[in-house]
Structures are given as structure tokens and as C-alpha cells.
Amino acid sequence: MVKVILSGTISQMAGGETEMEVEATSVRQIFRHLQERFPNIKSHMVDDISVAIDGSVFQDAWLEKVTENSEVYLLPRIGGG
Amino acid sequence: MDNSMDLGYGADDKELKFVGKRTNRPDGVDKVTGRARFGADARLPGMLYGKILRSPHAHARIISIDTSKAQMLSGVKAVVTRDDFEDRDSEFVPAGEMMVNYRDMIRNIMAREKVLYDGHAVAAVAATSIKIAKQALKLIDVTYEVLPHVIDVVEAMAPGAPLLHDDLFTDGVEPKPTKPSNVAKRLEFNMGDIASGFAEADEILEKTFDTKPVHQGYIEPHSCLASFSENGSAELWCSTQGQYLVRAHCSKLVGMEISKLRVTPSEIGGGFGGKTVVFIEPVALALSKKTYRPVKITMTRDEVFRSSGPTSGGNVRVKIGITKDGKIMACEAELKYQAGAFQGSSVQPGCMCAFAPYDIANVNVIGWDVLSNRPKVAAYRAPGAPVSEYAVECVIDELAERIGMDPVDFRLKNAAKEGTQTAYGPKFGPIGFVEVLEATKALDHYKIPLGPNQGRGIGSGFWFNIGGETCVNLNVNEDGTLTLITGSPDIGGSRASMCNMAAEELGIDVRLINPIIADTSVLGFNFLSAGSRTTFACGLATIEAARNAIENMRKRVAQLWDIPLDAVVWEDGAARPASSNAGVFEPMTLPEIAKIAPKTGGPIAGHAEINAQGAGPGFGTHMVDVEVDKETGHVKVLRYTVIQDAGKAIHPSFVEGQYQGGAVQCIGWALNEEYVYGEDGRLQNSGFLDYRIPLASDLPMIDTKIVEVPNPNHPYGVRGVGETPIIPGLAAMSNAISNALGLRMTELPMSPPKVLKAIKEASV
């Protein structure tokens, strides 16, 4: 099981949930699980999520692998000027 | 990007010939001789001139727009209004790498039901001369029903405030509001137990700070030239930080396929985030579509101020609790950010960055995205971060003083380091904040005695930095030179940095590489030159393209020598046998391989198409000495030093340039810059005479100290340096003035009248 922690607005989207454990081997699978568990989260919202896997931040990385011991944070997308 | 890709050696593995060197800027000669073509330099035969009619009201309902007289004027070829842009549903959809609400965007480029700020576009004309176009604007008859307006962020949140959108209901609060308001969103970030943290604190300080929206202040106004063909395709030349995002937005707003629109970026005379969106480009395309003639629109300075995006200002309350020995126990903040006339302020990154430089167990940050009758905000270096981190750094400075602790030591004691858990989510990997603070303390600047009415201040800052989608082609030419084609507009010397990295990889003279910034038809999608991503992400792609080209050249040579590929290595710009076992062959140089390329398989090139991941966070500290004239309130900046972790400075001159530019923008934001609105809600200082950005004569030399703690996710350790330099300076300036005067000002800008007022109030 992968430990997934929901940060800030992502937690708000998930009704205040801050942590969950999911069976997943990729970021895409975590997103699918998130949408199944929280149907109010629409597809475009998922497009606006970044992930931090064991400390490294990924954006638009659906195919990125996660392992059983991974600690995954879901956080708002990061932009810049 | 395939993160498992072996990106090879790091900076310590061998002596670097070009990375880290101050090579000549490839575009330098054209820039200083006036040959470089900026946005307004574009022109085509038969070109028309577009001008835009703008609202004289801060808030008004549009009852009618009559363009008949304007259309009758000789020389006028087209007029467009709201009716020429198809409306869109209110939904955030991906555009490039951004989430965009096109219903809002289409209303921002051309008002529909209401005008929402002074300068909001209402109609546009294309005519054979600028003079005729201006005359035509005067003939457009717009009937308004003027409505009450609101400018200030706190007033906009108050019950009964004039309402900008009657269908805007605050997101992120429970229960969902049944009444509309100007508050688009509430955000919250939590970590630990805030109440317990404050209970353990010996000292608690709470203060509220106010900053104003400020403009990015780029010297080159927005300008574009659009040319629509009868075959349904179009070309667009414009000054932008991202031609691919311009293509994405314009194709949606004008209603055309992406492949039919070709966007070419001009040289850019400053952007700083303000040229990551579109304003005039869809309008020029719409006018050209009506006439099938090229249409050029160039904003005046007045239009730039009234109608293009400033950054958010905000009202920020910060509460921090510490122990007697200087350990931060708990932090709380509430951020109210200006979004302008449509939702989407920079409050989210403001929340995420607020306390990120420090290792704190208990954090609570609440943010509010608030609309008012101002232009919709756009990005400005590290959007959102300067406002929140300014407030935090001021409170930290006061707390350090309260317990008699050196301000750098206080920050060192609490500094985030590798493994620190952030309130916004991830744990930090290797970062260089401690090294930045230690370098700060070691500077002579920190030890120089101060005179009367002088003060010294420091402030620190954090920014995430990003990667993103990037494509690069590296063509090996017949004569052994190379053409490096990237899709990232050069906003800070990136051509030179890319050439340095490519030359390092190839082992050839950097002057043999000619860098080109491509239009949208040449390469696949490239994200903006923004987010401090270009040297990192475009650099990764450049390195990968160079390695791809090297591999292709090794393959050719291996075939010529009739030995396996792994028996050929690339060293110092030539293919060589890997060892004596591979056989005895004279090395083949890059020009020799290029010369015979037609006979060995055809042209040789290297390519990279990546989504760069693993950007390294940036940390910086600014230190400034000021002298305050207590009779006039004038603040003179005596000395200023920027200390920042670059990871690796690929081209130190351009890293220093980013540091210096950020510091100057901090000084302007802290001392003078603000939008001044009249009672009627109209902007009163829409020009550089009245909107006072710092001039060279206002400034000392900005000293810099480049700290290099490598980012392990880049072969040379690059982090990205464009955003962080605008964060620490607001607090550094405020702390310096506070140190000089012995009083704390909590509102920016600290202009002479406000400084005098603060002195007067303190003496009562």
C-alpha cells in the first residue's frame, strides 16, 4: 500500500480527508483511486495536482512509478512568473 | 522525462570548460546595435493598425455599443466588439500546462455584460493609420449604466460591497454560500497542532501587513501583429514569454485549430510573468480575420498600466510563537489577495511559500482569493510569495530583536534543510538555505558599522522552481557548426546558458553553436519561460539533445571503422576508439564527421522531447543598508547584497543579473510603486513619471554572492534563479527602515509621505 497525504486545497477537495492508503504502482493509479473515492473531484481538478514522491516534486507525471513504501504527497500545481 | 535516464557526470567530475563561464551573449550585438526585433518592430505589406476602446468606468453595465459611425469612417476596415468572440462555459480547462477559465478570459480581452475596471476593453478597430483608428474610437457610442465600485481588498470582502459577478459563490467554505460575493475561494494549509505550539511559546507576536498590487514594469509594451489567411490559417508575431501558450489561448478564443495558428515570439523587452497571458493578441487576430489583412496592435504605456495584469497585493496577518532561545513553535497566517476583476490571484502559492523557509512543526495558513474593480492580476516573479513572505520575515525580525538574538542566527536556528517537512506538502531534498545564511554572515557587508539614521535589514525567501514540457533540436551543419533550436523565449540570457551546456557536452568551442528561438511550427510544445524553469528544463533538454547528437555521430564513426558502437567514445569534440582493443584509428572531429554525413546516412541531429521533473527549490537572503532623511521621509539605499543558492551558475553574469534585477524590483515595490486610484475608481498614475520604478540614479551597485548547492536532478546542479530574488527584498527593506527609525511600518510602499507620517505618529 502506498501512503498518500493530501495537502491544502487537495484535502479540501476530498472533504477534509488528509491521508489515505491505496494500492497503486503509478501516479495515474493514485489519481484514479482519488476520483473513485471522491466522485466530486472532477477530471480537470486532477490536472491541477502535483505530486511529491519521497520528496521529489512531479507535475504531469501520470506514468511515474510509486513503490509500496513510497510516501506520496498530493499538492496544488506550482506555476511561476 | 524518464527520471531513470542517466544524466551522467556532475560538476565535480571534471574541469568544466564552458559551464560556469562568462561566455559572450549570442544576441548581444544585435541588442546593442538596435538590430534585434522586438514586438513593435513587426510589420507586413498592407498592414492595418488596431486600437482598442477602453472603459472610462471602474464598474458599469454595458447597455449598448453602436459602432455604425466608426465603420463609416474612411480608412476603417473592421470593428470588433463582444459579439465577435464566441462565449465560453465557466469551466477551468487545461491550456498547455495551465488551467484556464476561458469564460473569464474572453470577458477580460473584450467586456461583455459589464466593464469591470478602468481600462477594460470594449471595442476595437482596424484602420489604415493609427490616426484614423483613434478617430474611429471616438465615434463608437457606448451607453453605460455606472455601478458602484470597490478597489480595496478588505472592503471588497465586506458584506454589502459592490458585487462584480452575481454568479460567484465562495469555493472552499462549508456550507456552500447561497449568496454571491467577491470572494472566489478560501484555501487552508495545516500541519501539526497550532494551539499546542502557541501554548509552548514564550513570545508571541501578531501583526497585519498591507501591500499594493504592483506592475511588472517591463519597458517594452505589449505588441503583436496578426495575419489571417483566407485558407483559415493565421500567423501571429508577438512579445511573449511563451508562444505555445499564446497559440493555445488564441486558437481557443478565436475558434481555430491549433495547427492553423503559427506564433513567432519576438525579442522581449521584459516580461517578469506579465507576458504569460494574452490581451491584444486575440483582438488583432479577430480584426485580421474580418479583413484578411495584417493587423498590428501596440499598447501605449497608459494601456499597459490600466489594462494588463499587475501582481496581487494583499492584506496579510501573521502570528508567530517562539521560545526564549529562538525556536519557532507555531505559525499562523491569513492572506487576503487581490485577484482583480476575475478570480485567480496568487494566494495559493502565497500560502504555500509563507513559512516554507523554516522547519516548523505547527502551521496554519488560510488564504482568500478576492475580486475587486482592478485589472485581472497576472504572474510576476514568484507570484504570491513576496507578499506573504514579506509579512513573515518582518515578524521574524522583530521576534529575534525581542529576544536579543542576531537575525541571521535566528534564521539559521530555524532554517529548513534536507528532510524538513513543509506545510504545503513534501519534504525537502538537498537545499541550500543554511549555506545561504552562513554566506550572509560571512560577508563584510554584515560587519560594516552604520551611521546616524542608518539601518540594516535582512530578509529571506523561498520559491519552488519548476520543470515542464520542453523540446530541443540540435542540428549538426555541413561545416561542423551547430544550430541549437529551442522553444523558450530568451528572457534572461538563456541562449548563452544553453550554448554553454551544449558546448560542454559536445566538447567544442561554444562559438560554433548558434542558438535560435523557434516559432510554434518548428518544435513540439514548450511551456513558458517562467517559473525559473528555463535554464533547468530547457537545459536538461539541451543536454539530452547534445548527447543524442553525440550518439548519432558515434554510430556513424563506428560504422566507418567497422567496430561496435561501444568501442567508440566521444571526447573533446571528437570520436575516438574506446581503447587500444578497439583498433588503431585517428580521432574523427565533429567537423570531419559533419562533412561526410551525406555519404554516411544523411544529416545528423540530436533531439529531446521531455517533461522535466526534479526542479530544485531556491532560497535566498537579501541584506540592505538604508539611510532615512527624517525631514523629507526619503529613503536612500546605501548598500545592497543578494545571497542566493543557484545550484550551479551555468553563466554567472546572467545569474547575477537575475539577482540584481530582483533586488531592484524589491526596492521599487518597497519604496514607491503602487496603483493610485481616484474616488471614481480610475487609475491616476498610468505612466512612469507617476508610477515610480527605481532608476539607476536611485540605486547603489547591487552586490551578489552566488551560493552553489547542486540540485541532484540536473547534470550540472542547476536550480533556477529567476523567481527567488524578488522575495526577500521587501522584508529586508522594511527591516532596514525599522532598524534606522526604531519603528515598524506595516504598509508598502514606504514612500516619503508615509515614512514622514510614521515618524510623526511615533513622536506623538
Image (cartoon, coloured by chain):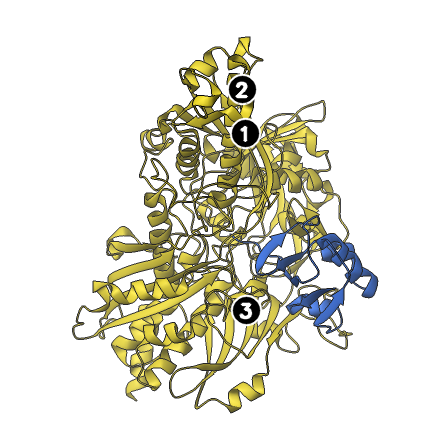
Foreground: disc 3 or disc 1: 1
Q: Chain of mark 1?
A: B
Q: Is A14 placed above or below B699 here?
A: below
Q: CA distance from mark 3 to mark 1?
A: 38 Å
Marker disc for residue B422: 3
Q: Amino acid at mark 1?
A: Asn
Marker disc for residue B109: none
Horizontal placement of B32 versus A60: left or right?
A: left
Query: Quadrant of the rendered structure where residue A8 is?
Result: bottom right
Q: Chain of mark 2?
A: B
Q: Residues within 10 Å of mark 2 (few under 14, many from 20)?
A: many
Residue B308 place in picture, x, y as percent: 53, 51
Which residue is labeled 1 in the image?
B548
Chain assigned yellow: B
Asked if the residue at tag 1 contacts the one at tag 3, i.e. Cβ–Cβ closer than 8 Å, the answer is no
Query: Quadrant of the rendered structure where residue A14 is?
Result: bottom right
**Secondary element at image label 2:** strand
Question: Residues at marks 2 and 1, common chain?
Answer: yes
**Secondary element at image label 1:** helix
Q: Is B172 placed above or below B595 here?
A: below
Chain assigned blue: A
Which residue is labeled 2 in the image?
B604
Return the residue nearer the eye: B762 or B478: B478
Residue B55 place in picture, x, y as percent: 58, 53
